[in-house]
Image: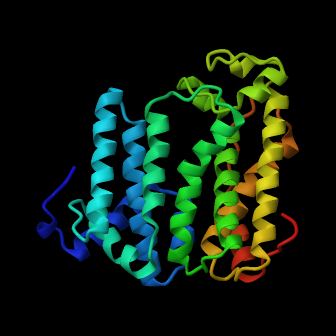
Amino acid sequence: MSVAASSITAAEARRHAEETVKRSGTSFGAGMRILSRERREAMYAIYAFCREVDDIADEEGALSQKQVRLNAWRREIERLYNGAPTTPAGVALLDPVKNYDLPKEEFLLVIEGMEMDAAGPIIAPTMDGLLAYTRRAAGAVGMLSMPAFGAPTTEDANIFALSLGDALQLTNILRDVEEDAAQGRLYLPVELLKKYGCPLDPDTIAEAPGLPKVKEDLAGVAREKFAEVRTALETLNWKVLRPALLMMGVYERYLDVMTARGWDNGQPKPHLSKFEKTMIAMRWFFAPKLKSA
């Protein structure tokens, strides 16, 4: 995993981070590209770290092996904050950490979130447990991204980051219920599954008669989170937050598509055309609407 710090130049580390973003094909890439060079490189470095720890959780292998690798990343974060990282992604983070005062605890929370997946599969968590997971898997990324965007350190900025992380992750969960179930995962909260008489079993959830109601209720939670983002945004400079708002627009549109067609079992995973994504991007680039989707 690691290479001697002295053998990795800053330019090589930045190139590694950018290539990680490009290889991933992430939909976050479009938002990163509208940033200034320095801020874009910071976001590439944050993404590269997140990608690498996420890959540990998703790859095949024993939990003990994954734990060793995640603990290695904990040590790398310690080295990073002591100015001596030893991995390309760690070196790429040196300037962003120094320039934007990125919070160390949020990197550690991302690792905790990946540990939750690595120790899984996650099956029917409590609602509180699900939100603890989204706080780590998505909210922590938002909290790292805000200073890189140039957002102020305020309560509303924190609400924006954390609520948007919840909203995006919950929308992802709703998009991927059947796909996750095929991999033995079931992120839907146990309270809703029991409320509508659904099995707490990934193997049979896709055919459960109560599943549409579970999805509908969880979609309502995601809507509440998007509303919290809009309220927080009213006190913030939307131009600074355009990369995050591009993602918000895309994911809110996914939620709209799923809601409009209904939550019946067996629906295909929703997709947006390149034109639709471009129009969403233009809306947020020029004239955001704070009150409605």
Residue 262 versus residue 100 in the image, above or below: above
Q: Tell me the quarter of the picture where residue 175 sits.
A: top right
Q: Is residue 161 above or below residue 215?
A: below
Q: Is residue 96 above or below residue 166?
A: below
Q: Quadrant of the C terminus?
A: bottom right
Residue shown at the point (57%, 24%) measured from the top left: 182
Q: Quadrant of residue 151?
A: bottom right
Residue at 54% across, 23% down = 184
Residue under the point 39% across and 67% down: 45
The number of discs equals: 0
Q: Is residue 23 visible?
A: no
Viewer-nearest residue: 263 or 151: 151
Where residue 105 sits: x, y (%)?
46, 59
Give x and y (percent) for residue 148. Answer: 50, 75
Horizontal side of 61 relative to 84 (left or right) equals: right
| Residue 74 visible in the picture | yes
Percent position of residue 80, x then y: 29, 65
Colour logic? rainbow
Q: Position of residue 252 (x, y in %)?
A: 75, 56
Instruction: Compare residues 8 and 189 and report the one nearer the observer.
Output: 189
Q: Residue drawn 38% across and 58% down? A: 49
